[in-house]
Image (tube, rainbow, N blue to C red):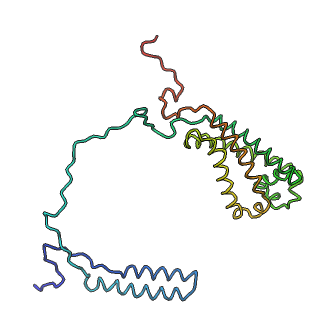
Amino acid sequence: MAHDPHSHSDENSVELPTPTAWPLITAFGIFLLFFGLVTTVVISLLGLLCATIGGIGWFSDVFPHPKHEPFPIRPKDQWPQPISPEGRSVSHLHVGEHGHREQYPAAAHPYAAGFVGGILGALVMAAIACAWGVLVDKSIWYPINLLAAVGVPSLAAADVETLKVFSMVGLVVAVITHFTTAVLVGLLYTVILPMLPAKREWIWGGIIIPIIWTGLMWATLGLISPAMNAKIEWLPFLLSQLGFGLVCGLYVARSVRISTQRTWSVAARLGVEAQHPGEK
């Protein structure tokens, strides 16, 4: 029987495929091939050449015989010792034990506070915007129509003089949009504020969050709606946001917190009054 020169009989080593960079070169060539479709044909030709060379080199690693290299095997006395399990159990904390909480926050502000705070903040926000419109823009309808332009295409494309004229459609859309958004933000405050540092909730909700929101709008409105970005005035926008945040944030922060329902019993969640076993 003929001896196979590629056979491996050393018990102290194992054969593994020889390290090679040809697959990486082939992949890079394929990338250049497709990248040239959106750039220039020269890149595609270069990628085709690179992929061809890489494919030939990769193929030569496995034909006519796969290339392997022997890697020594560590002696058994150098093998890592098996991990022996220990009979330990994990102690689980229970809700209320050592201050452990099942979820964060353990208590939140009622939704009613967010609803009322959103309405009050919306009134203050509208008063600031309209006052600026009367004193600076000489029209109370300018900030109203500018807000309504979000949902009315004709107002979004209108010029400044047109936005200063009364529009019934603009008034209705602005009122609905303004108060709906304010209520939703107020409800969001009831969830966000309990997660912020204690005793400083109103500062986060009244100052920091409005500033962050105004900065985000200033940075992105030019990409979303260039027409509105050219008409909006950022100083009254910031002042109205701060007015809303201070009123809504302070109102929600001063409301009495209620414990989250996951800390309640099933009977308390369902509103069931269970009778004590000793009572009749």
Q: Is residue 242 shown above or below 23?
A: above
Image coordinates for residue 31, horizontal then vertical, percent: 48, 79
Asked whether, in this view, residue 131 is left or right of residue 9, the answer is right
Residue drawn 89% across the image and 59% down it: 161
Q: Residue at x 71, y 63 (%)?
A: 222
Residue 72 image-quadrant placement: bottom left
Q: Which of the two residues, 125 or 228, is positioned nearer the viewer here? A: 125
Side of 150 where 275 appears, left or right: left
Quick check: 80 left or right of 274? left
What residue do we see at 14% from left, 67% from top? 75
Q: How many marks?
A: 0
Quadrant placement of the N terminus: bottom left
Which quadrant would residue 137 be assigned to in this image? bottom right
Between 163 and 170, the one nearer to me in the picture: 163
Farthest residue to the top: give it.
280
Q: Is residue 51 left or right of residue 169?
A: left
**Residue 92 x, y percent position in the rendering:** 35, 38
Residue 186: percent from the left, percent from the top? 66, 41
Could you tell me which residue is drawn at 64 percent across and 37 percent down?
252
